[in-house]
Image: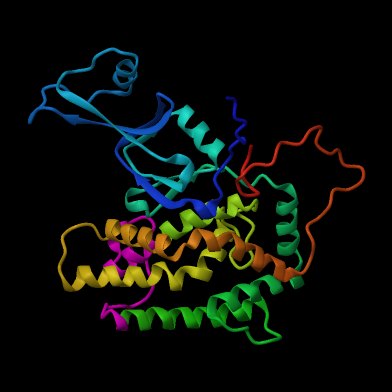
Amino acid sequence: MNVNLPELGAIPMKDRLSILFIEKSRIDVLDGAFVSVRYESKVPKPTTPEPSMDALLQANNGTNTSGEWQEIRTHIPLGGVACLMLEPGTRISHRAVQLAAMVGTLLVWVGEGGVRVYSSGQPGGARSDKLLYQAKLALDDALRLKVVRKMYELRFGEKPPERRSVEQLRGMEGARVRKTYQLLAQQYRVPWKARDYDVDDWNAGDIPNKCLSAATSCLYGITEAAVLAAGYAPAIGFIHTGKPLSFVYDIADVVKFETVVPAAFRVAAQFIHQERRDSPERTVRLACRDIFRTSRILEKIIPMIEDILSAGEIPLPEAAPEQVLPAFYEKGGLGDDGHRG
């Protein structure tokens, strides 16, 4: 019996896992599956080096590689993950990148521990009406102020004072943020001077600042994935500007003090008071993953983005009469507005 099944598309962001880190492996599509491939030695001291990419391809074509190494494949549920963080030692094939774009999964190339972003893919942001809508809100001073006020209202749980400019609101925000850091440091008994880090020398930072940087990088990853999935541009910010992820920083700041920042201080306290020897960055990432899952943050970010931008009280723009509309329209999928295909 023939059964007509609906065509499947990208899974909505709210139904996905938040973030997955991959390091020291080769990522490819093998036998129809998105996999991470690495090698483990079968003997204590192998006499041959770990197989190269050419050897990997030969092995997948049926040619046996050195008998001292065993290929380990780990299947990754790509379509169910919002963001893949690719750490040093990771290689990815053209076919794997293509598949990630098809299912709307953001790929981000990061430094060790996910603490520095080098590059990222862009599987979404494919709604021109939403991009024009966002740009109009950002370019009009009055509309931009409405959006910024809404951000601060959601962030602090109260409406900001009337007749304040964006610059004045930023000054008020800075004072509250510094106070919040101090209160969290007191709560977890963590030595705290100020938010301070050197982008060129990671090891120069103290444990609390390292934990905060690792935590916010996790939040930025899933926030960028959500911004793109919603059909907006990460670079068009309202408070932040001049960076490729200005809007990502705007949105992440709304939720970071109720999610990842307390987790960073909690982990920092463990390493300071318990003298742990493992990696604080890895521990922070695991803590963030658990927070993202229990708080179901991916269900909240896209509606929050729409709520914030709707404060401008303008409709989505319509095409001008003289513009050429698409010759054909793609079928509606299951994914979010920004997902391609």
Question: Which residue is at a point 55% across and 54% down the rendered structure image?
Answer: 226
Seen in the picture, residue 266 relative to 217 is either above or below; the reply is below
Query: Height in image: 162 above or below 107?
Result: below
Eyeballing the image, is 15 above or below 46?
A: below
Q: Say which residue appears at 42% left-offset and 61% top-offset.
A: 292
Q: Is residue 108 visible?
A: yes
For the point 18% across and 25% down, the residue is 69
State the residue at coordinates (64%, 57%).
236
Residue 172, position in %: x, y? 55, 83
The residue stretch that appears in magenta: 186-215
Residue that extends furthest to the right in the rendered view of this protein: 321
Q: How many marks?
A: 0
Q: Quadrant of the C terminus?
A: top right
View extreme (front): residue:
1
Residue 135 is drawn in which quadrant? bottom right
Q: Position of residue 114 (x, y in %)?
A: 37, 52
In screen coordinates, is 151 left or right of 188? Answer: right
- Render colour scheme: rainbow
Q: Position of residue 326 (x, y in %)?
A: 80, 36
When the figure is inspected, residue 140 is found, relative to residue 56, above or below; the finding is below
Q: Would residue 214 be seen by someone viewing this image from the given angle?
A: no
219 left or right of 111?
A: right
| 206 within the magenta span | yes
Residue 272 lies in quadrant: bottom left
On the picture, is 130 further left or further right than 237?
A: right
- Residue 75's spot in the image, x, y percent? 36, 36
Q: Nearer the viewer, residue 242 or 186?
A: 186
Q: Is residue 38 magenta?
A: no
Question: Can you say which quadrant of the picture contains the N terminus?
Answer: top right
Q: Residue furthest left?
A: 44
Q: Quadrant of residue 290?
A: bottom left
